[in-house]
Amino acid sequence: SMVDEFRNDHLDDPQKVNLFVGTQDSNENAAPPVLMKRIIQKGKARTLRKFLIDSDVVIYDLQSSDLAEAEFALKTMQATEFEDERVFILISSPMAWSDTKPKTKMI
């Protein structure tokens, strides 16, 4: 899985170990993934903003996440001036792109 690819909890330096944080609706009863170290309740904008700004990589699955929350995250990342590069990954279904016209380049 993607989480396994980002795992590096075998490192000796706790500052370099990836911290996995997620959001969860208070109505959701599903258990969070094992690697999640912190769950942020949806609607806690200040807490979410702090973790977004402190993160090097942010991943949103558009199939299972709240679109408003994903937009908030994207706007937060765009409005913040970072010293280092950040990565924002959006995961979507191929069907989300089915009506997109292909771009062709004349050679």
Image: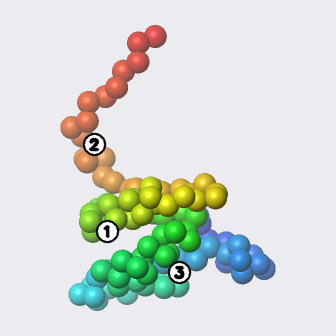
Q: Residue at x 31, y 80 (%)?
A: 42
Q: Amino acid at mark 2?
A: Trp
Residue type of the residue flagged with mark 3? Leu
Residue behind mark 2: 97
**Pointer 2 or 3: first along the chain:** 3
> Which residue in the protein does label 1 denote?
69
Q: Please give left or right for residue 8 compared with residue 24 in the image.
A: right
Q: Amino acid at mark 1?
A: Glu
Rendered location of residue 20, percent (x, y) = 53, 76
Q: Name which of mark 1 and mark 2 comes first in the sequence.
A: 1
Q: Residue at x 71, y 73 (%)?
A: 16
Question: x%, y% of residue 18?
Answer: 62, 73
In the picture, the disc for residue 19 is none
Residue 89 position in % (x across, y down): 46, 56
Tags 3 and 1 touching, CB below 8 Å: no
Kindly identify the residue that appears in the image at 58 percent across and 59 percent down.
Answer: 82
Secondary structure beneath disc 2?
helix
Q: Quadrant of residue 33?
A: bottom left
Residue at image coords 42%, 76%: 48
Disc 2: CA contacts within 10 A as few (<14), some (14-19) or many (>=20): few
* SS at badge 1: helix
Vertical position of residue 86 compared to residue 23: above or below: above
Q: Is residue 63 in sight in this rendering?
A: yes
Between 92 and 53, the residue placed more toward the observer is: 53
Q: Is residue 34 visible?
A: no
Rendering colour mode: rainbow
Q: Mark 3 vs mark 1: which is more N-terminal?
A: 3
Crowd rating for badge 1 (residues with CA inside 10 Å; few <14, some 14–19, many 20+): some
Q: Nearer the viewer, mark 3 or mark 1?
A: 1
| Residue at the disc numbered 3 | 35
Left or right, 40 with reference to 21: left
